Image (cartoon, helix red, strand yellow):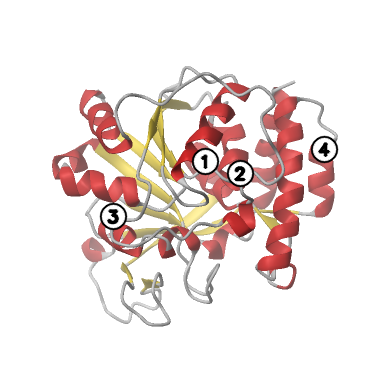
Amino acid sequence: MEQISVIIDCDTGIDDMVSFAVTLSSKKLNILGITTVAGNQKIDITTYNTLNGLALMGREDIPLARGEEKPLYRPLRDAGYIHGNGGLGEYYFKNPTSKQPDKLDAVHFIYETLMKSEEKVVILALAPLTNIAKLLMQYPEVKERIEKIIFMGGSIRSGNPTPVSTFNVLVDPEAARLVMKSGISFHMCPMDTTKDAYLTDEDIEHIGKINNPVAQMNYQLCKFYNDTVNKNNNAHNRFKGLCIHDLCTAVYLTNPELFTTVKYYGDVETKGELTTGFTMLDYEDILRKSDEEKNVTYINSVNRDGILKIYFETLKSFE
C-alpha cells in the first residue's frame, strides 16, 4: 500500500486527541511529524498534551515540533472554557513521557521536512493556521512541495463560537486568509459538515465499554466535552449530538470515499466589527469566478456511519 506522507498541525485539546486514535494507528499514513500551535490552549499545554498522546498511543517515534504561541497579529483567544485548563477536560496523564520536542521550531521543522521529502506532503491542519501562514511567509518556495492542506474550520451557514465564525479561523483570521489564498490546494472541512459526524450519548457509553487506556481516555474526554459544549455553546439545541470536528477531518484524509466535495471561491473577513473570522464562500456563484479562481475544495457531505465504524474499530485495536 502506498502511504500518504503527512504532517499534522494541531492545538491538542479534546477533539484533536480523539482524532489521533485514527491517524496515529492508520497504516495508510506516513506521519513525517506533528507540530503544535496555540489555540484550544496555550502552546505549552497543547505541546505537553501532544507529546503524551503520542506516548500513550505507542507513537513516540514520530517527531514533534513546538509552534507559535500566539496568532500573527492578535493576542491569543483560547478555548479553555470548552477544553478545560489542561486542554483535556479532567483527564490527566498518570505517567508523563520524557519525550521532548524537536530542537527546531514548527516553522523550520516543516520547512526542512518538506524539502527532504521525495514526494509531496499533505498538511492536516486541525488548528489555527498560524504555523502554516508563517511557513509560507518565510519560505514561499515550499508551496511546490505541498500536495494539499486539509483544514478543519470555516462554514457557510453558522459559526462557533460566534454566529458567523468558527474557532480555528477566528483565532487567527489573517493566517487563515493567507493560507486559503496561497494557491495551494485547500480542502476545507467546515462546521456545516463536521456537525454531521456526531456521537450520541449511547455512542459515548459504547466507548466507555472498550477496555483499554486509549478508549478510556476517549470516553473521559467525550463525556467532559459533551457537558461543556452543551453548557457554553448551546449545543444541545443546535446539533444532533457531540460533534467531533477533528475526527471528521482526519477521516477525510484516510478515507475520502466517505465524503463529497465541491469547489468554491473563498475568502476570510479580517476587519469586520461583527464578522471577523467569517469565511465567505461563494456557493451561489454570485461572483462568477472561473474554475481556476475557485480556491476552496469544500467538503459538503459525510457518511457518519462510515466514520463511526472506523473510529470504534480503531479504539478496539488498542486492546
Residue 194 location, quadrant: bottom right
Q: Amino acid at mark 3?
A: Val
**Residue 57 visible at all:** no
Q: Amino acid at mark 1?
A: Ile
Q: Specify whether 257 is left or right of 30.
A: right
Q: Amino acid at mark 2?
A: Gly
Q: Which mark is residue 86?
A: 2
**Image quadrant occupied by the C terminus:** top right
The secondary element bearing badge 4 is classed as helix
Residue 141 location, quadrant: top left
Question: Is 113 placed above or below 35 here?
Answer: above
Q: CA distance from mark 4 to mark 3?
A: 38 Å
Q: Which mark is residue 179?
A: 3
The secondary element bearing badge 1 is classed as helix
Looking at marks 4 and 2 on the same chain, the residue that comes earlier in the sequence is marked by 2
Q: CA distance from mark 2 to mark 3?
A: 29 Å
Residue sitting at 49 percent across and 61 percent down?
167
Looking at marks 2 and 3 on the same chain, the residue that comes earlier in the sequence is marked by 2
Looking at marks 4 and 3 on the same chain, the residue that comes earlier in the sequence is marked by 3
Q: Which residue is mark 4?
A: 208
